[in-house]
Amino acid sequence: MTNLKDKYVYLFEEAKWIKKEILWGKWHGLVEMVSLWLTIPDGFIITTKTCELYTENQNSYSENILEEIYKNLKKLEDSTWKKLWSWDNPLLVSVRSWAAVSMPWMMDTVLNLWLNDETALGLIKQTWNERFVLDSYRRFIQMFADVVMNVAHKNFESKLEELKIKKWYKNDIDLQISDLKELIIDYKDIVEKETWIIFPESTKKQLQMAIEAVLNSWNNDRAIIYRKLNNIKWLLWTAVIIQEMVFWNMWETSATWVCFTRNPSTWENKLYWEFLINAQWEDVVAWIRTPNKIEELEKLLPKSFDKLVEICDKLEKHYKDMQDIEFTIEKGKLFILQTRAGKRTIKSDIRIVVEMVEKWIINEKEALLRIDVNKIETLLHKQIDEKSKENSVFLWKWLPASPWAAIWEIVFSSQKAEYEKWLWKKVILVRKETSPEDIEWMISAEWILTTRWWMTSHAAVVARGMWKCCISGCSQLLIDNWNKTFSINWKKFQEWDTITLDGSTWEIFEWKLNTVDAELSIYFKKLMEWADVYKKMEIKANADNPKDALTAIKFWAEWIGLCRTEHMFFNESRILAFRKMIVSTKIEDRKKALNEIEPFQRNDFIELFKILDWKPMIIRLIDPPLHEFLPQTDAEIVKLSEEINIDLKELKNIILSLHEFNPMLGFRWCRLSIVFPEITRMQIKAIFSASLEVQKSEPWIEIPLVWNEKEFQIIKKIIEDVAEELQISWKVNYKIGSMIEVPRAAIIVDKFASDCDFISFGTNDLTQMTCWFSRDDSAKFLIDYVKKWIYQNDPFQVLDEEWVWELMKICIKKAKKVNPNIHIWICWEHWWNPKSINFCHKLWLNEVSCSPYRVAIAKISAAQAALEI
């Protein structure tokens, strides 16, 4: 008996003993459906090991694997009661690629394999349906030539259109038997003309070429781009499935298409499907025929309808998830082709898991782990203001492919969408249709509007996966690509005109409508309650003003983890006093300017303390490069000279003297407080005065970028002196700590950590100083570094696990050794990224601080990190 470990091809009954990594998603799903006693077309799988060998051996594999394939074909012949390569009851198969992750339309498929002149005659004898067989045959030639032999699809379409025009036919279904015979001959001639190869009649040759084409599609442009878009780096190979063909275009009792166990856009717990009666797959893809709705199947094929409803319920309960099911009905018999977790919006995903918890299908932990936190940001996008619609021009309402709002300019060209992206412009791509080849251009556009397709089509499914607004099936939208215009409801629009798409209500409006903040559903709030229960880290928010603080509290921030005091002076009414302070050359002038600044700071802190209501707030002392606040143009310098009554030449000399070649490593951070202690005294006085007035505050004062223990001790002494002057030691519960932003501070932290109440990692600066990358300029090369796997991720997006994370581990160990009760957290750019949150959880950090709009993402990520360990 053959050892299963040495096999490359598996039947259904063998599959239950095999690791999922060898068979991958679809086959594993098919095996499970067999165990549920569902009817599926019989077949077998060629494992991922074959794809690996094929690639390593420069697109070839051994005769042993081919022998295994032929042996399993014989077994398939026995189980289906059909004969291989024969005109008497011939067996036709499909050859498909399938990986562990659903990649819709990205890889290749060949249908109706083994049709040739001889097997076509046998199929006609078997089915008594000559038109069906000849139509399948001409479509097979076109598909095989396109996918396997690289003959452009348009060559066949041109020949078909030429015939339809000649015969005055409107659609493909109008073709007669004589027309189909003519097309079969013409299609074979096209193949020979384009490739100098006669179209293969040998079924063995067809099979080998089809398998190789499917394996090669793993590295086609579409698949590579899709994997990059979805950050699929761990997935190396694909399996190949060979399965008996079942036909949905044989008679009026045949049908096919896709079913969702829940509505993929409106997230209702209601079956949603579209189907076609007696149609070929290409009829759907080419939008030749409009699909029917669920209610019509119940009328046309009631037994199949009832069975499909039963199967939908069974599969959703079995997989404990919404399912995307492909089905075929052949002469009244229902076959399930595949099932997988359905692509849907994050809003529907949240509702689905919450409802499943309420019905005891899954538990709270499983619900949290199922959420893709990268998509949560789309819930926080602004939505169209319903009031603004009252005075707007309504154009039309279509199919809700993905429910987000889009207000931008129109382009018609995929290439133009890509070009505008390079110019940092966002556009709405208007097309008749999209295809798998458009994947790169769909990434470039922010929103998509199509005249063809429907909710189960390429544009809709891919847009939902990319979290883009998409409205599809707009048949009343007339596009003139030549003149770059389209019209709806008798209104004409040109390229670069602005329209509004409301993906939630499926509506299109003229011009630009107002937006409002998104309202979070009861399902989302319930999910956040569960996240609070299971997470181990507290999630704080960065907020520099009362508005940000209110937003942070609205989005469930537990307190303020970073208030950057220099940001309080970007306001036009305040920056003048700040500039006076910067350009002052005498301490008396600087103190006068600081006296103007102090009320601004104190009032802001009063407002923030009131909003927080006893919640702590980490306040970072001023730390920016001074040149950021100084005027840059001659006109601005002249204006400042007049406003502060200083000689223009003297002012220019001061500004020149403050210029730094490398400001990121220059006169900023705690160095300002060391050289100008009066600045620190002013800030501390403003903080403590506000605390005394509000009487319900807890300020944590953070000293920025300490790299020497003496720096910390000097500035801590200033803070304590002001506290003693104001006599607040028993009135205000304040704490003093430092940011760790340079490698030296992380290494010598044990020299001052015993005097700290807390430390916080500023990972942007720690990353650039550890890796020696400029966070402002690194984008010029880091993209290529990630592409070439020098770095797995951009270290300014995902925490560098190899160096920065190790440095943090050293720092935490040293700090805890001298001060076991020290509070440690991380703030700034790595706050919400799920992978970075996981790193923080493993470091046993107390908290993470992030943007107010990322708090929800960070909370759920923290809960997932706690549950996965």
Image (cartoon, grey):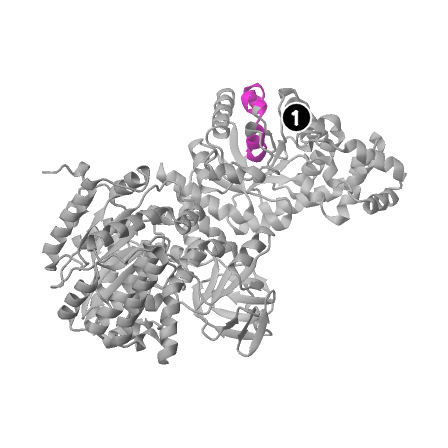
What segment carries the magenta color? 744-769
Instruction: Name the residue nearer the viewer: 521 or 233.
Output: 233
Q: Position of residue 274 (x, y in %)?
A: 32, 68
Residue drawn at 42 percent across, 61 percent down: 459
Which residue is disc 1 drawn over?
Answer: 716
Q: Quadrant of the N terminus?
A: top left
Q: Is 40 contained in the magenta span?
A: no
Q: Quadrant of the C terminus?
A: top left
Can residue 830 be seen in this snapshot? no
Residue drawn at 19 percent across, 73 percent down: 129
Instruction: Name the residue nearer the viewer: 553 or 377.
Output: 377
Direction from residue 447 to residue 370 in the image, left or right:
left
Mark 1 residue crowding within 10 angstroms, few (<14) / some (14–19) / many (20+): some
Q: Position of residue 207 (x, y in %)?
A: 23, 52
Q: Mark 1 belongs to which amino acid? A: Lys
- Quarter holding residue 283: bottom left
Residue drawn at 50 percent across, 26 percent down: 807
From this view, report whether residue 836 is shown above or below residue 500: above
Query: What secondary structure is the stretch in magenta mostly built from?
Result: helix
Element assignment for label 1: helix
- Quarter holding residue 705: top right
Instruction: Name the residue nearer the viewer: 155 or 83.
Output: 155
From this view, report whether residue 76 is shown above or below residue 175: above
Residue drawn at 76 percent across, 30 percent down: 678
Can residue 85 be seen in this snapshot? yes
